Image (spheres, rainbow, N blue to C red):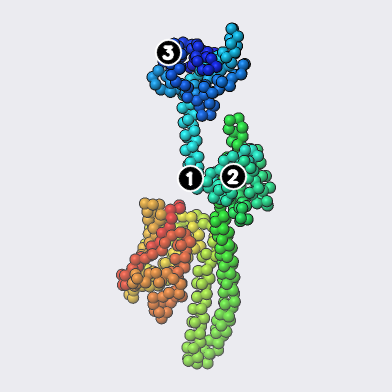
Amino acid sequence: MLMRQAGFFYERTQKGDFTFVSPEVTDTLGWTPEQFINQWSSWTPIPSKETGGLHRLGQELVLGDLKIYRCKIPGKCGRLFWFEMVEQRNESSDGDSGFIEGFARNISNQCREEELNRLQENQLRQIMDFAPIGIFQTDPDFNLTYANTYWKVITRHSLKETLGKSWLPLIHEEDREQFLETWKKDMKYNQECFVQCRLCRPDGEFRWVEFRTRLLFQDGGRIIFGTIEDITSHREMALQLEKQTQDLKRSNQDLENFATIASHDLKEPLRKITAFGNRLMTCITQKNDEQSLYFLDRIQMAGGRMQNLIDDLLQLSQITIESRPFTPVDLDALLTEVISDLELLINRSNAIIKLTALPRLMADEAQMRQLFLNLLGNALKFTREGIPPEIQVDAEKQENGDWLFSIKDNGIGFDITNLERILKPFERLYGRSDYEGSGMGLAICNKIVERHNGTLTANSKPGEGTTFFFTYPGRT
């Protein structure tokens, strides 16, 4: 069995003088047995740092002892080779107790592999030391066997304090039981353990950390390999975000409460003003008091505007308050219904409306109806005197999958520098005596488009008509 290995047998004295070397030394080192024996007096095998060498261990051999060590022996080519020397001290036939038999096995390839592994392991350790996350290794009892530089940054404990000791005491006592329970459960099914808990620093400060650990099998034993990350700032941001979310919910609730108050408490006095105004109108009409009729008419008009303003405010607030889920909407059918609702105004102005095929989209149907109603209503309202309105509604799919909708008219137009202004609530470019309305229509349109993740814009010139554009992300 030994002869099949790359090596040779030998016999030597206690002092190190070789008395016999097997012929295999030629295959291994290039020397003949005679050359190897003659050369021995001119050099000494170079011992391994870990196990010592021939010149030292040979003198320590006791009769019957077996010793194994490593050393370097030069070949005839001048290159040094690693050998594993297996020796036993025996008694010769003539009674000499300094007789040593041995076998030298060439382990140069094995040593090169071991050296390469050591270099790779050192490189890996250096990489782990530079990693911006804590990396550690423990035995199954959580005794720390390795930790990188960032472990010390996070825990503020030196390796001298923690190496070889259990790091479980570093976990906050209120979190320790939950950590162990989760860890045991995940290890039972050989899963990665993921735990967030508080960690105690030497100065008494607590930091929220995230542990990721896994049980591995190495060299027949078990080890725990893991990472640790300081998530204190992330948790603080999450808590702040949660607080902001709760504040926003309360704000929305307050807004919803305001909408309820506005719809009831503000409308109720208006209803009474309108009701008693109508009665008063009947009485004054019978007396034919023209001045009183004029004043009363102004009161009723103001009350009507107030009613419309409240309705528009409620509609604007409900766009974000009542977030209904999107459903498939056939815009062709929806636009047909909108045109039907505007039929009286269309007939009165002799308007011509041209339509192209519109897509079917996921949207809030009620809000899309209001969007088209407001935009078409504006096109029918802001017309040039003596010129029947012509309105073109188009939809075009863009290269990125988005839809671009346009509503073009031949009306009075406006200065495009006022675009940003008219998309805000209560903004008007013309007086009420010229065009009725609350100044909320386009603001409502803008909110609806924003809720559908689109953008509302326009192209216009005074006296040349207006085209409103809005985009819709490519969800069909």
Q: How far apart are the alpha carbons under marks 3 and 1?
A: 53 Å
| Picture quadrant where residue 345 is located | bottom left
- Residue 194 makes an appearance in the image: no
Disc 1 residue type (three-letter): Phe
Asked if residue 460 is positioned above or below residue 194 in the image, the reply reads below
Q: Which mark sits nearer the N-terminus, 2 or 3?
A: 3
- Callout 1: SS: helix
Mark 3 residue type: Gln
Depth check: 367 or 92 in front? 92
Mark on residue 309?
none
What kind of element bears circle 3?
A: helix
* Residue at the image point whose x is 53% and y is 67% from the top: 318
Mark 3 surroundings: few (<14), some (14-19) or many (≥20) residues within 10 A? few
Whether residue 136 sits left or right of residue 410 in the image: it is: right
Residue corresponding to mark 3: 35
What percent of the width, then of the height, locates residue 270?
56, 80
Viewer-proximal residue among 209 and 268? 209
From the image, state whether disc 3 or disc 1 is nearer to you. Answer: 3
Circle nearer the viewer, 2 or 3:
3
Left or right of 242 on screen, residue 39: left
- Give the labeled residue for mark 2: 160
Q: Name the residue under label 1.
A: 130
The kind of residue on which mark 2 rests is: Lys
Residue 142 placement (x, y as % from top left)? 63, 41
